[in-house]
């Protein structure tokens, strides 16, 4: 067996995904700022005729940031770090290397078709599962190839014990596969109607309350297995690598991994509180959401304590800043979620802007910050160049942090205000406000949110420029940096 | 303690799968045994209403409107009786939504007329001056896809035993017969209530604009 120190890793696939992460990040978040602005200034709905309304653009925003930006970031990190923690280079596995590139092409095709079909209004209408059946099949193929590649790399590994990140990647693969298949069971209408109607149209296998249960079992756990599990895989690799510190506690990582796996799935019912879903399922959803604080905080605390004794790095290295703030936002978000899952709180919070507020402190503060840090850690190693600008990274960090804070504080106030106004009654017990009163009052908060989103987007453009310059014009590096990423 | 498991990827993966599938087995599957039964007197959607539901999906109304009235006095006062599971028995997919930027629509047919909807979709501010909802004028021009809606009715009848009558049969001929005898008269009735001349002329010529199907669907939500 050759010495692992001599391994030359192949980053060609990781690089492809890095670029798509940057591009989808810009596209998805630009649409996000546009639709946020539409709620504050409705005239902006008319920029592109029937294709430009808030309702038509919103799934485009969510799908491009989830399946474009985030999945690209995850795949880039996977194809970069899996080689390193398994001690196997893709250059040694030509067929798997080819499959990985093929998988990337399938990804581009699926992403393009998804954007086109959502733009045209072709949708199965389930949130985060809008794709109609032909696209579903393509996505299943994509995902299965990823699984084949993952397990082929594991099979060829030199490092016998799987590193923590690999646990989470395996869980991501299995979890998404199971949930996606079950939620997207649908019957194509063309085969049962004697060839009538649109060929891509289908009806869900489940009806009404059943459909809702399966959908939120997916919807909630898409958050688990796309926005949490693989992002934890990333931070477990990139934070120790960038800081040069060992992970604080192996036992804590064990506890939080198996705890998260077991508890997360139960919590899906909290999206359906006070609905027509059986009461015991709602209660289970509530209880397990609160229990979920433990494994979530376990991972976050494990990451923060990894910095023990080295907190000075927080002031010196912007990538450490991004990752430490990401863990902190993860803690905030995983405390906020359980609070919203308490039935009495949910009665006020559900259907209001507090929910998108919660989602965004998670995705902007945790997911996207982690993706930015991962991409910038990988760039010097993959492109063999120094990071183009440290000051640009610092500026991006503060601008985006301001953006996130404006976003979630305004949405907290908006959500609670509206939730309270919906239920407010006068001294005779009559409703005090008409619905439109509760909309008009939100205008200032919608404006603040749009400004917060715009600040965040400016940060994304700064990042894209910095990344592009790093890849093309950064100072060339003689040898691979070991820990802290070099930056000018 | 668990080191042996981390050196055995196959067992590790099986373990993860069991642990994550567990909740589904206990929480999700039992609900399927007793699939939501329709409440008494619930009729399946007509093909025109299904076509309207497709417009509702296409323009993605669920981004801002829910169809789920929760059992609180503040909600029943505002929207009407709280929602029952059996009312959704023919909803594939369910359209509860998750955000109320606009009001709930589960019983909108009880308190809004076709004429009101027509004005509202053409220009929301004409009926709700402070509305932030965009206008959906294209629904007055685009022709609704009745054929796909009909295909859906045939599919749910054959696959899920949704109780449609004999007039819902596979094939082009059955569809055209249904369109002429059932869907067009139904659309004409709505068009007359809408007081919009161009829409009425379109329907009289045998073309059903999206707005007519949409209003048929909204009117059915009671």
Image (spheres, helix red, strand yellow):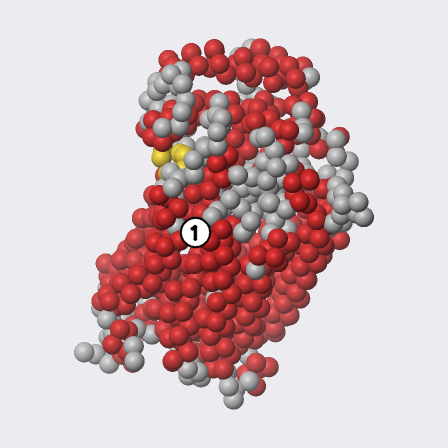
SS for dot 1 = helix
Q: Is residue A122 left or right of residue B205?
A: left
Instruction: Name the residue rendered at 61%, 73% in the picture.
Output: A394
Q: Is the residue B171 above or below the residue A376 in the image?
A: above
Question: Nearest the camera: B72 or B2?
Answer: B72
Q: Is the residue A448 above or below the residue B200 in the image?
A: below
Q: Is the residue B37 above or below the residue A374 in the image?
A: above
Question: Nearest the camera: A176 or B93?
Answer: B93
> Residue B17, located in which quarter of the rendered image?
bottom left
Instruction: Name the residue rendered at 50%, 16% in the picture.
Output: B183
Residue A143 location in percent, x, y? Answer: 34, 53
* Residue at far bottom of view: A309
What residue is disc 1 on? Answer: A218
Question: Nearest the camera: B99 or A465?
Answer: B99
The chain identifier of the residue carrying mark 1 reads A
Residue A223 visible in the displayed image? no
> Residue A145, located in which quarter of the rendered image?
bottom left
Q: Is the residue A285 above or below the residue A334 in the image?
A: above
Instruction: Name the residue rendered at 54%, 41% in the picture.
Output: B96
Instruction: Name the residue rendered at 69%, 26% in the picture.
Output: B116
Residue B168 location in percent, x, y? Answer: 39, 19
Q: Which quarter shows the N terminus of chain B?
A: bottom left
Q: Which quarter shows the C terminus of chain B?
A: top right
Assess disc 1: are there few (<14), some (14-19) or many (≥20) residues with their C-alpha within 10 Å of its C-alpha: many
């Amino acid at each position: 067996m050759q010495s692992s120190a001599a391994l030359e890793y192949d980053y060609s696939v990781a690089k492809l995904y890095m670029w798509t992460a940057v591009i989808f990040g810009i596209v998805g978040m630009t649409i996000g700022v546009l639709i946020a602005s539409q709620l504050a200034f409705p005239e902006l709905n008319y920029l592109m005729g029937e294709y430009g309304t808030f309702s038509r653009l919103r799934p485009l925003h969510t799908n491009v940031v989830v399946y474009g930006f985030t999945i690209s970031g995850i795949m880039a990190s996977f194809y970069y770090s899996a080689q390193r923690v398994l001690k196997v280079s893709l250059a040694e596995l030509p067929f798997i290397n080819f499959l990985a590139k093929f998988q990337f092409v399938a990804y581009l095709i699926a992403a393009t078709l998804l954007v086109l079909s959502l733009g045209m209004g072709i949708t199965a209408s389930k949130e985060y599962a809008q794709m109609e059946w032909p696209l579903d099949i393509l996505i299943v193929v994509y995902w299965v190839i990823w699984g084949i590649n993952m397990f082929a790399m594991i099979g060829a590994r030199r490092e016998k014990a799987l590193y923590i990140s690999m646990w989470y990647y395996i869980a991501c693969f299995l979890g998404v596969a199971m949930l996606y298949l079950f939620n997207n069971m649908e019957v194509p209408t063309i085969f049962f109607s004697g060839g009538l109607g649109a060929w891509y149209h289908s009806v869900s296998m489940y009806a009404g309350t059943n459909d809702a249960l399966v959908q939120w079992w997916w919807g909630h756990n898409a958050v688990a297995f796309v926005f949490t599990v693989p992002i934890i895989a990333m931070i477990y690799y990139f934070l120790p690598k960038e800081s040069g510190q060992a992970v604080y506690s192996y036992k804590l990582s064990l506890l939080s991994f198996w705890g998260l796996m077991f508890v997360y799935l139960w919590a899906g019912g909290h999206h359906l509180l006070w609905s027509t879903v059986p009461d015991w399922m709602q209660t289970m959803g509530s209880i397990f959401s609160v229990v979920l604080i433990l494994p979530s905080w376990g991972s976050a605390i494990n990451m923060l304590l990894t910095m023990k004794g080295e907190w000075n790095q927080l002031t010196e290295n912007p990538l450490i800043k991004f990752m430490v703030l990401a863990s902190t936002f993860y803690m905030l978000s995983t405390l906020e979620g359980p609070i919203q899952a308490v039935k009495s709180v949910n009665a006020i919070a559900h259907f209001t802007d507090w929910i998108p507020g919660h989602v965004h402190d998670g995705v902007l503060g945790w997911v996207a910050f982690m993706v930015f840090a991962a991409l910038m850690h990988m760039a010097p190693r993959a492109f063999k160049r120094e990071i183009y600008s440290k000051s640009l990274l610092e500026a991006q960090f503060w601008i985006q942090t301001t953006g996130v804070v404006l976003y979630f504080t305004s949405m907290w106030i908006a959500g609670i205000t509206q939730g309270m106004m919906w239920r407010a009654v006068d001294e005779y017990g009559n409703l005090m406000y008409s619905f439109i009163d509760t909309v008009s009052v939100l205008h200032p908060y919608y404006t603040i949110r749009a400004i917060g989103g715009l600040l965040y987007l400016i940060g994304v453009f700064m990042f894209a420029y910095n990344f592009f310059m790093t890849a093309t014009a950064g100072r060339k590096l003689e040898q691979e940096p070991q820990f802290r990423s070099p930056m000018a | 303690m668990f080191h042996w498991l981390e050196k055995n990827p196959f067992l590790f993966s099986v373990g993860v799968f069991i642990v994550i599938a567990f909740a589904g087995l206990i929480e999700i599957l039992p609900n399927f045994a007793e699939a939501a039964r329709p409440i008494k007197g619930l009729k399946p959607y007509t093909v025109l209403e299904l076509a309207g539901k497709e417009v509702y999906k296409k323009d993605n109304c669920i981004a801002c409107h829910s169809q789920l009235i929760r059992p609180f006095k503040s909600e029943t006062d505002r929207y009407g009786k709280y929602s029952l599971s059996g009312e959704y028995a023919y909803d594939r997919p369910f359209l509860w939504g998750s955000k109320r930027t606009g009001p709930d629509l589960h019983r909108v047919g009880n308190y809004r007329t076709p004429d009101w909807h027509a004005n509202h979709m053409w220009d929301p501010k004409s009926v709700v001056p402070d509305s932030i909802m965009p206008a959906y004028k294209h629904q007055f021009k685009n022709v609704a896809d009745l054929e796909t809606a009909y295909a859906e009715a045939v599919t749910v009848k054959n696959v899920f035993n949704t109780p449609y009558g004999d007039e819902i049969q596979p094939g082009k001929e059955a569809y055209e017969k249904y369109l002429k005898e059932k869907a067009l008269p139904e659309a004409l009735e709505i068009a007359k209530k809408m007081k919009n001349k161009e829409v009425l002329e379109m329907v009289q010529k045998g073309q059903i604009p999206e707005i007519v199907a949409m209003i048929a669907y909204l009117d059915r939500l009671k």
